[in-house]
Amino acid sequence: GGSSNGGGYGIGSIESILLVSVSCLLVTYGVVTLRTFAKIDDTAHAGAAASSGNVRGGGGGGDGDISGVADPILPPSQQHTFPISIDSTPYETIVHPASEVRSIRTNDEKQRVEMKVPTFWDPDAYAAVGGIRQHLGQHGKRLVTPQEASDVGSYVTIGQHQQQFETIYVAIASYRDWQCTATVEDIFARAKYPQRIRVAIVDQVDPDDAKCAQPSTPCGTDPDQILCRYSHQIDRYEMDATLAVGPVFARHIGHRMYRGEYFAMQCDAHIKMVQDWDEDIIEQWKSADNEMAVLSTYLSDIQGAIDEQTGERLHLSRPIMCRTDYEGWGDERHLRHGQQPEGVPGIHGEPTLEPYWAAGFSFARGHFVVQVPYDQHLPMIFQGEEISIGLRGWTYGYDYYTPEKSVCFHMYAIGKNKTKRKSVKLFWEHSNLYTGSGSRAMARLLGIIQMDNGVDPDMWIHDEEEKYGIGKVRSLQKFFDTFGIHTETQTVEPHLCRFAGKKMQMAFKPHLRKDQMGINYDEIDFKFKDPAPNEKPPPLNGARG
């Protein structure tokens, strides 16, 4: 998992009372979208001045009026408006995942509690072919084509020269986190072109908690506050903390809030950005020359890594995702990524290929979150979310890279920040209300990625398996064989980190397709074996190895 999220439903003796209280909460909880007209001064951002135009769903205003309509020379499919708010698009009713599990366990449909959520981005232009997912490779049945990939992604026109910039969607799942507001402020303040960014927050809070991205003073009093200046580029979905069921469901709603931006980024609610991070990470992504590249890693600790006043990056080391092992017992035994090795990259001018995906930071083309959305039916999952998204994305044809340079850093509960972060509540505070739902969810998660090791299929919900399932561009067995995972014995080949990095890059990069649509693993006949079988592998949370 990546950040702190959570909540719960009651079962057992408090079931009836909780059902009533939850129903009341669902009536009263709201979706709060920040929208305030403000005059923007662009001089602090490289002299960029947004061109005049219309903003759909933005309520006008901010940054001198931004036109997100692409120039006529671009394909019609790219002429998206930016920003598009969730409050200008439809909502739908879903069953809360914990109550869904409970209703099945008790065989009582009355236990199902409904809630309203934004619909997934699915432009009307693709209705005739069955929707955007069908258009993009038929739900993973085949690799998306370059033309189909180019159909996803809005642009924004900035400056007197009418230059077009790719837009960036940033999804943040926050659980009662007092740092969330500062993180949102930093995302805009440190960007070279903040006009291109749209932030969506899934804010899981108690009634008395501070709300994420709320300005310290009313925008009418001080419209120059960052959160006022870019309010039309911020969406906030509020959920009562007692309805939260972990990071997977929170981030699922975050994926529902995506609205066609060119890039999609995911991060935690307690990070600091480097100066001009947006230009930096886009340049790194482009240097991979791979449309299917996903830059993803665990973030380094903030201490000693960044000048918090200037945003200057103070060291060049970064983690690489290569260490995992099985943990847990019985039917819930699963792969979990551990502490990852960190060092100065040996490859320069481009990101480095890695086997695994990380939830704490992910940056990719927008079609990644369209094709591989978080599963709606996984309540109370923390460990396991990364191998789920990672394997599903890989079978759709996506490749994972660690950035050469970190563009943000994480505040962990260590050192001088230990007391600060320990004060933040975790979603486990309501775990007593969710007994049993996590086990059923883990059975589904492992069943979908074919790592269930014979668990009874009747143990888990099979709804929407195509939507949240694996692709057919690459087989799961190919992944297991390539990276030394033995599902039958639930063991891994240790010391994979000795291959990840230069060796993996040299071996696999030559197989990047000529049209830049991912690594062609059909051309690769490689099976990782432990290069040091007589050496004890390091513990998941121990030193490098």
Image (spheres, rainbow, N blue to C red):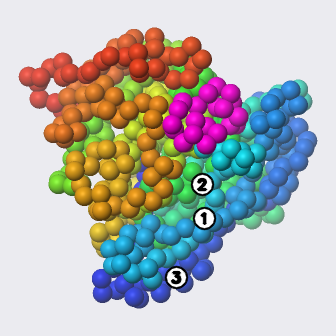
Label 3 to label 1: alpha-carbon separation: 15 Å
Q: Is residue 91 left or right of residue 391?
A: right
Q: Earlier in the sequence, mark 2 or mark 3?
A: 3
When the figure is inspected, residue 200 is found, relative to residue 528, above or below; the finding is below
Label 2: how many residues lie within 10 Å, few (<14), some (14-19) or many (20+)? Answer: many
Q: Earlier in the sequence, mark 2 or mark 1?
A: 1
Residue for badge 3 = 23
Of the residues shown, which amino acid type is indicated by label 3? Ser
x, y percent for residue 477: 31, 32
**Hey, which residue is sitting farthest left in the picture?**
534
Q: Residue at x 33, y 79 (%)?
A: 106
Q: Residue at x 36, y 84 (%)?
A: 15
| Marker disc for residue 256 | 2
Count of all numbered marks drawn on residues in the image? 3
Residue for badge 1 = 117
x, y percent for residue 330: 17, 54
Q: Is residue 194 visible?
A: no
User: 152 or 28, which lies in front?
Assistant: 152
- Magenta-colored span: 134-153
| Marker disc for residue 14 | none
x, y percent for residue 335: 27, 43
When the figure is inspected, residue 288 is found, relative to residue 476, above or below; the finding is above
Q: Is residue 101 left or right of residue 186?
A: left
Of the residues shown, which amino acid type is indicated by label 2? Arg
User: 515 or 140, which lies in front?
Assistant: 140
User: 334 or 473, which lies in front?
Assistant: 473
Secondary element at image label 2: helix
Q: Is residue 154 visible?
A: yes
Q: Residue at x 39, y 45 (%)?
A: 388
x, y percent for residue 502: 37, 14
Of the residues shown, which amino acid type is indicated by label 1? Val
